[in-house]
Amino acid sequence: MSGGAFLIAIEYAVFEPLEMCKLATVCKQAEAIMTRAWRHIAPPSFSEDCSNLVCKDCLNKKKATRAWGRCTRCIQNIRLISATQAKKDFLLKASMLDLLEHKESQSMYNHSQIIRTYMWQEVVELALRIHKGPKALLARIQLQKQLREGPSNAQVTRKLAIEKHMRPGGALHAMQSQEAWAKCAAPYVANGSGGGVSGVIRAFRTYTHQQQRREELEAALQVHGLQLRKDSRLCKAFIEETKGCKTLEETIQTMREMDWLHKHTDYAERMREACRVIGRSMRAEYDLDWIPQPQYDELCAEYKERISQRLRQQLLPSSMQ
């Protein structure tokens, strides 16, 4: 009995009379039976004499080789597939691929590694026999794709641990918005970073404190007819309570001054001109044709603050100073 026929006989003998409820248990037994059977099937040998081989496609005897019975020219027109790709695309195992004729070559990246190459058509036929038809094969491939894209067991466990603290009375019971989940819990659920559940609780407390400071700042700005700007480093420093940040009164006063300067003076144009002068001076000092924006901002931040203070002293009325 040939290798392929023996493989099909084993599959039908083991799987056909099964009930669905016993399939999971018997699949392991059948896999062990097939693995033991495949060990007794010798892989194709390529040590025979090739002097009398004839190419199966062009019937050329002089150029016949041992690889799949084709000549060198016809082999270039055959679609090939590696063993790794065959296992991934068609859900096959190495013991199954041993039944097919293959070609061995050295890896171009690791010369000690041997790569096996198979004919794509033979791999497809073997996969259809093993998985019992194209519909069953496509269904298993789709199932494997869903399992790979879905959350892992560790991610599900971490998510359940966080949801336990989100119950009424828990430390995370107020974490209901998607923004809070994305900032506090999502990194821990995805890859376990963030210091565990206790780290998520600390991050949520910090997030809640910052939201309270944000609401306090927005309310104070609204009294003076101002709005919170997303690009304001002054407001961001107050919300995040960074080192050296200003108090609420100082932040509101600075925001009022900047609003008046932008509306009633040429403060913005003077600042842009000052930044251009600073950039030219720095390029001349460091002998550079161009300075990247992050390095430029870091270098001239101190100078810009000094220039801003001088312009405010010159342009602001005495009643606002």
Image (tube, grey):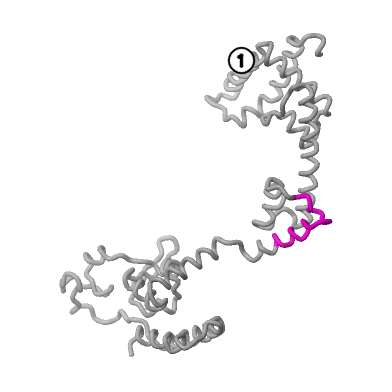
Residue visible at 78% across and 39% down? 210
Callout 1: 10 Å neighbours few (<14), some, many (20+)?
few
Residue visible at 69% across and 11% down? 264
Is 167 covered by the magenta stretch? yes
Residue that mark 1 sits on: 273
Figure check: 97 above or below 215: below
In the picture, measured across the screen, residue 177 lies left or right of residue 55, that is right
In the picture, measured across the screen, residue 51 lies left or right of residue 265, that is left
Figure check: 117 above or below 311: below
Figure check: 99 above or below 315: below
Quadrant of image for the N terminus: bottom left
Q: How many marks?
A: 1
Element marked by disc 1? helix
Q: Nearer the viewer, residue 179 or 127?
A: 179
Residue 57, picture quadrant: bottom left
* Residue 148, horizontal then vertical, whole percent: 54, 63
Residue 103, picture quadrant: bottom left
* Residue 98, horizontal then vertical, whole percent: 39, 79
Residue 258, picture quadrant: top right
Q: Nearer the viewer, residue 274 or 283?
A: 274
Residue visible at 71% across and 24% down? 302
Residue visible at 39% across and 67% down? 82
Q: Which residues are magenta?
A: 158-175
Q: Nearer the viewer, residue 61 or 318?
A: 318
Q: Nearer the viewer, residue 314 or 43?
A: 314
Hey, what amino acid is under mark 1?
Glu
